[in-house]
């Protein structure tokens, strides 16, 4: 989806993080987990979990642990997965790379 069309791009980072916190809390509740149970499962304190659910701010390590608990590790990895290149795209990249390598000849003194 284009950035200019998707309304999420008009939100601030803090607004998006708060939404993440709300979604994490809702997922925890849907899995019938108390804050204590979930915090213990992902290796953080209840106070830390409460802050995450309120602000959405966390570390990638905690996000990974939460994703593991909810069975979402593959989805987390897929966020930045690059699409497969077509043979033509691969050829174009190789061609550009070859031009760059050719242009970097060392001058003998």
Image (spheres, rainbow, N blue to C red):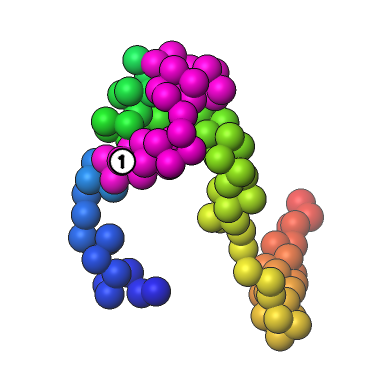
Q: Vertical placement of 106 versus 47: above or below?
A: below
For residue 96, what is the image quadrant?
A: bottom right
| Residue positioned most to the bottom | 88
Nearest the eye: 89 or 17: 17
Q: Nearer the viewer, residue 96 or 81?
A: 81
- Outermost residue to the right: 108
Residue 10 lies, in percent from the top left, at 21, 60
Residue at left 69%, top 75%?
85
Which of the 4 image quadrants contains residue 70? top right
Q: Is residue 28 magenta?
A: yes
Label 1 sits on residue: 22
**Is the magenta region chiefly helix, strand or loop?**
helix
Res. 34 image quadrant? top left
Residue 54: in sight, yes or no?
yes
Q: Quadrant of the N terminus?
A: bottom left
**Is disc 1 surrounded by few (<14), some (14 to 19) or many (20+) residues within 10 Å?**
some
Image coordinates of residue 48 in percent, x first then y, are 38, 18
Which residue is depicted at the point 71% across and 85% down? 88
Q: Secondary structure at mark 1?
A: helix
Q: Which residues are magenta?
A: 18-46
Q: Position of residue 19 (x, y in %)?
A: 29, 45
Q: Confirm whether the magenta stretch covers residue 62.
A: no
Task: Say whether residue 95 is visible.
Answer: no
Observer-nearest of 84 and 50? 50
Q: Position of residue 28 (x, y in %)?
A: 43, 35
């Amino acid at each position: 989806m284009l950035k200019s069309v998707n309304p999420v791009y008009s939100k601030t980072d803090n607004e998006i993080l708060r939404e993440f916190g709300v979604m994490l809390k809702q997922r925890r509740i849907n899995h019938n987990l108390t804050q204590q149970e979930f915090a213990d499962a992902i290796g953080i304190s209840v106070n830390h979990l409460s802050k995450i659910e309120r602000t959405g701010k966390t570390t990638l390590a905690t996000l990974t642990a939460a994703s593991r608990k909810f069975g979402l590790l593959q989805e987390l990895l897929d966020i930045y997965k690059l699409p497969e290149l077509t043979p033509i795209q691969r050829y174009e990249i190789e061609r550009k790379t070859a031009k760059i390598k050719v242009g970097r000849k060392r001058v003998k003194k």
